[in-house]
Amino acid sequence: MFKVTPNPPGNPGSDSDKSSKSKKLDEAAERVLDYYLNPKPAETSNKSQTAHLFMVAPDIDTETLLANASEDLLSISAIAADLADDVDGSRRSVILAISRMADGVHLLVERAMDRLEAQAPA
């Protein structure tokens, strides 16, 4: 027995239903592509908050900043000097140079602190 079938077989849904489904899928695909490939620029308030990973508080006075820098330089020098004891050759020379450079910068910071104290009203 021979059964007649249309060529191509028809879909159970109507043409308007098919076009609306296709249109919805196209819109969804476009939204997804826009979301991942064309992100909207972030708000400026969020950008200013995340632009700086680390930041010094703006209301800290100069003397406090210099005092902390001085202590940090002493720490760097001490770490480098300690590390130089464990190393030989050219590496030792490099580490000792770092220690001495930190000492020199520490002296500069101390001089700046002395000048600040001299300028301060008695």
Image (tube, rainbow, N blue to C red):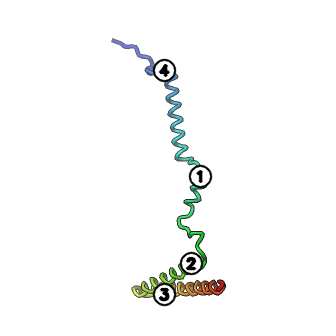
Q: Secondary structure at mark 2?
A: helix
Please tell me which of labels 4 and 1 falls first in the chain: 4
Q: Secondary structure at mark 4?
A: loop
Please tell me which of labels 2 and 4 falls first in the chain: 4
Marks 3 and 4, how far apart at CA: 84 Å
Of circles 2 and 1, which is in front?
2
The amino acid beneath tag 2 is: Thr
Q: Secondary structure at mark 3?
A: helix
Give me the disc on residue 64. Answer: 2
Q: Secondary structure at mark 1?
A: loop
Q: Would you name the residue on which mark 4 appears?
A: 14
Please tell me which of labels 3 and 2 falls first in the chain: 2
Above/below status of 112 relative to 34: below
The amino acid beneath tag 4 is: Ser
How busy is the neighbourhood of tag 1: few (under 14 within 10 Å), some, or many (20 plus)? few
Marks 2 and 4, how far apart at CA: 78 Å
* Horizontal and vertical percent position of residue 55: 55, 68
* Horizontal and vertical percent position of residue 25: 50, 34
Q: Would you name the residue on which mark 1 appears?
A: 43
